[in-house]
Amino acid sequence: MSEKKSTKPKKAATKKAEGKKPTKKTPTEKKTTKVESVVGEKSLVYVDYSATTKDDGVVFDTTMAEVAKESGIFRENDRYDPMLVAIGWNWLLKALEEELIGMKVGDSKTVEVPPEKGAGQRDPKKVKMIAKTKLAKHKTRPVKGEQITFGNERGVITAVLGRQVRVDFNSPLAGRTLVFDVTLRSIITDPDEKLRAVVKRRIPGLPVEDFKFSIAKKSVTIEMPKETRYIQDIQYAEIGIASDALKVFDDAKEVKLVVTFDRPKPVEQNTT
């Protein structure tokens, strides 16, 4: 006589013990870039500014093309874009950089910089008498108001006195209080955006989209397009890029600039 098989369903062997909740697996959280709301002591920012001399209100520098045109100082080959500033590295006057700390994007501020924190006080010893014959050897005209380079110094002829000229080698801004009207345009926090900004600062003539960036551990790698090989004195721009990158990435130990040349495709022979 055969045994009668039970019709009750078998209990699952993998049934979880009572009272224990299943552990829910969560996807790996994606790292997000910390967004800075105010400028700090090591921030990388873009600013616009116009600079005037306090005593006469004359604009002598600006990042904005319209202001340059209105002030009569526009130069066709100059760059008129917000200026990249790494706080703490004196890319601007130190006294002005210090005033940026604590500003928010969109904030504007007027900053007065006294001579001792700007171009310095006037030095009477930098006003010199030079013989016209010496100027002739440098192919310089002895004309009042003429800007000259004499040796390693730049100056302005302030008077023509017989066989000599008086040249002022002081900075044109020496002894003057400078006034900066500055606006904070952006604070850069994304690592790739920092590298794009550094590259644009040094090589403005090529699209930043042509460069590729990677950051691994303490090494920064920038893949340069082959077109950079045709830029005159590119080695100086590369040194600047490496230096800037090390400034804005405190943890980086090295910067690699890489140019890759592919093997050209062989030319097909026409056998007909």
Image (cartoon, helix red, strand yellow):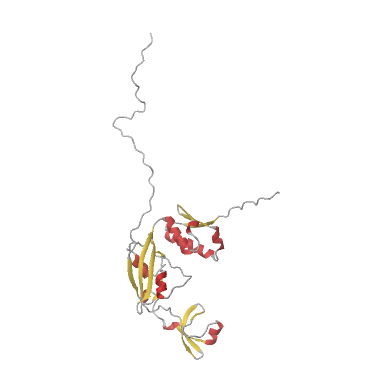
Residue at (56%, 83%) from the top-left corner?
137
Q: Residue furthest right?
A: 272
Q: Residue furthest left?
A: 19
Residue 111 shows in this picture = yes
Residue at (55%, 60%) from the top-left corner?
227
Q: Quadrant of residue 119?
A: bottom left
Q: Quadrant of the N terminus?
A: top left
Residue at (42%, 69%) from the top-left corner?
65
Number of numbered labels in the structure image: 0
- Front position in the image: 160 or 57: 57
Q: Residue furthest top?
A: 1
- Front position in the image: 66 or 34: 66
Q: Residue furthest bottom?
A: 162
- Note whether 87 is above or below 8 in the view shown: below
The x and y percentages for residue 251 are 42, 56
- Judged left or right of residue 239, residue 54 is left
Q: Quadrant of residue 176?
A: bottom left
Residue 61 shows in this picture = no
The x and y percentages for residue 100 are 35, 66
The x and y percentages for residue 102 are 32, 63
The x and y percentages for residue 73 are 43, 75
- Judged left or right of residue 64, residue 260 is right
